[in-house]
Image: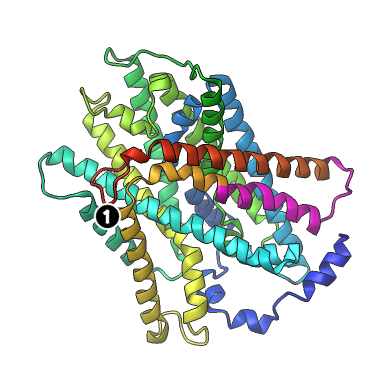
Amino acid sequence: MAPAAFDAEAGAAAKPPAAEAADAGAAFVLESKGTWWHAGFHLTTAIVGPTVLTLPYALRGMGWALGLTVLTAVGAVTFYEYSLMSRVLEHCEARGRRHIRFRELASDVLGSGWMFYFVVIVQTAINTGVSIGTILLAADCLEIMYTSLSPNGPLKLYHFIIIVAVALAFLSQLPSFHSLRHINFASLLLSLGYTILVSAACIGAGLSKDAPVKDYSLSSSKSDQTFNAFLSISILASVYGNGILPEIQATLAPPAAGKMMKALVLCYSVIAFTFYIPSITGYWAFGSHVQSNVLKSLMPDSGPALAPTWLLGLAVLFVLLQLLAIGLVYSQVAYEIMEKNSADATRGKFSRRNVVPRLLLRTLYLAFCAFMAAMLPFFGDIVGVVGAVGFIPLDFVLPVVMYNIALAPPRRSPMFLANTAIMVVFSGVGAIGAFASIRKLVLDAGQFKLFSNNVVD
């Protein structure tokens, strides 16, 4: 489709300014006041989280050469994809159609009503899943700290889930994405902090006399090697994915042209440090024995801890605090949908008319996420499935499709062909990765117990 045809067709779908002004979700939750570095803080919190501690496990499924190659390739592809999506958003904005929601951007560019609902469903699954996972993992961090101080204490996992949910319910009353900018800057610093601590702990563990024998061999079964490799790719897709870039770009004060690229450079500068160092040190220290969370390898169930208690405790505290920021970021899409349908944009964001439904709806949402976290404490195995069926369509497939349609590069140009190749490859990777992740879920099913007091890795 030619750009002119796309502009004419999509222009009919664009909302008039008056309609946008009356949208409380846009006016309150996605208010556009931020700078490029604020967007960089939001994006870094959305991507760089405690999931980086699973990267040594991802390398375990592929080995040194393939693992580091894929880690670099997925990083390069996601940077490219996010830059393309930002250019599509800027292209639409330059033509009078500023989109602040992923679902509306996809529906406008692809001209398909069902695409709107597809993005809504996938985004909701990702954001709710991440919210559940952050509550569960934060509660697990609290339980680790508690049991180290009081090994026979009466508190159980669900007590800590309630504590985390109450803390998030309090913080969730910050009305807008932009109001999280200071929290997300602190989140960036926390990610650097626990990366340094965990990497130093892994180096120390690898050099200690209690270190496990370093074995970097892969499974002897070719089928297991294949499934493990695709599971690792799904984990990497989850780690690099975010699924909310349009909503983050919406927080930029207009015009947004060029600002998101600066935010991406800031984010990927942090990624280069926080992804490679723990990946390499964790896999070097534990090899094929590394667990799905390298912190668990540093604190084995039997035998002494392989790092100083104060260092591990500080790392766990940093992880806990950053999880609260991640939970807030990934709840913003749900809050925007709630606010759009419940708030009155003609009244102040702190008026009683808007504060009461905000307090009620956000608290109920977090209560639901907390209940699911308590009921399903085996969320670790779901991370790969989320990556394959959620992040891959939104972050690896749709950006290149939308760019090819919106900006219409010549069909035989290197960019068009590269975009098409990325779409085909990652569609296949997503399908195989989903199968591999579900296979692991089935193999681990015997460990699962509803409302268990232990988090299954």
Residue at image coords 22%, 45% = 143
Q: Position of residue 112 (x, y in %)?
A: 73, 66
Which quadrant, please, contains the N terminus? bottom right
Which quadrant, please, contains the C terminus? top left
Residue at image coords 50%, 74% = 28
Say if the magenta span includes residue 406.
yes
180 and 10: which is toward the camera: 10
Q: Position of residue 93 (x, y in %)?
A: 73, 66
Q: Which secondary structure dominates the residues rendered in magenta? A: helix
What's drawn in magenta, residue-wise? 389-414
Q: Position of residue 104 (x, y in %)?
A: 65, 67
Asked whether, in this view, residue 392 is left or right of residue 90, the answer is: left
275 and 452: which is toward the camera: 452
Q: Position of residue 86 (x, y in %)?
A: 68, 55
Q: Amino acid at mark 1?
A: Ile
Count residues near mark 1 (Cα–Cα under 10 Å), then give few for <14, some for 14-19, many for 20+: many
Can the viewer see residue 254? Answer: no
318 and 73: which is toward the camera: 73
Asked whether, in this view, residue 251 is left or right of residue 186, the answer is: right
Residue at image coords 28%, 63% = 166
Can the viewer see residue 81? Answer: yes
Q: Is residue 41 above or below residue 223?
A: below
Say if the magenta span includes residue 224.
no
Q: Is residue 449 above or below residue 292?
A: below
Residue at image coords 38%, 55% = 132
Q: Say which quarter of the image contains residue 432.
A: top right
Q: Which residue is mark 1?
A: 161
SS class of the residue under badge 1?
A: helix
Q: Say which quarter of the image contains residue 252.
A: bottom right
